[in-house]
Image (tube, rainbow, N blue to C red):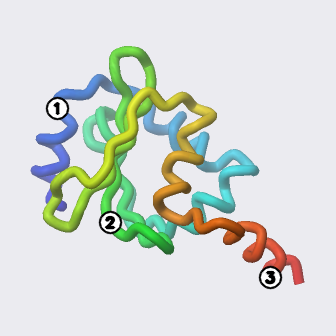
Amino acid sequence: MTVAEMEKFAEKWRTFNVKETFHIFHIHENLYKFALWGVEYARNISDRALFLKLNGRLYKYWIAITVDSSDSYTVTFFKRNNTVKAKFELINNQQLVGVIDDLVQNIPGYLEESAKIYAQ
């Protein structure tokens, strides 16, 4: 996805504090999940959209995190041809990591098995 395509996508969204969103990802209980997404690139587009290029177990491409007029997050997953694969709206702070993780990484029992391996 080119920067021009990202900018065009971001035009319609309101501005938000991208640093606060990154803070949500780096809270202790979310950090492990965030690390498993395999974030290759992160791009802030005019404080209107946070694009992450992911290399997770189930999903490997760009997502956009935006905020709508009701202060809710919208997470958009893109296909390789840059069309929308899935879009999740009205997400609050507590739901953000879970929504992304479910599509990027979540295989039933995967986190529990990974935790056992790393605990050894």
Task: Name the residue nearer the viewer: 110 or 41.
Answer: 110
Q: Is residue 118 left or right of residue 71?
A: right
Give the foreground label among 2 and 1: 2
Identify the element where label 3 is drawn.
Answer: helix
Q: CA distance from mark 2 to mark 1?
A: 21 Å
Q: Quadrant of residue 40?
A: bottom left
Which mark identifies residue 117? 3
Q: Amino acid at mark 2?
A: Tyr
Cβ–Cβ below 8 Å for labels 1 and 3? no
In the rendered image, residue 98, in percent from the top left (x then y), is placed at 58, 47
Give the foreground label among 1 and 3: 3
The single residue placed furthest to the right in the displayed view is 120
- The numbered mark, 2 or 1, whose residue comes first in the sequence reads 1
Q: Is residue 13 visible?
A: yes
Query: On the rendered image, what quadrant is the N terminus found in?
Result: bottom left
Q: Amino acid at mark 1?
A: Glu
Mark 1 — residue? 11
Within 10 Å of the Cα at label 1, are there few (<14), some (14-19), or many (20+) other Cα atoms?
few
Within 10 Å of the Cα at label 2, are there few (<14), some (14-19), or many (20+) other Cα atoms?
some
Q: Is residue 88 left or right of residue 23?
A: left
Mark 2 — residue? 61
In the rendered image, residue 41, in percent from the top left (x then y), is placed at 37, 63
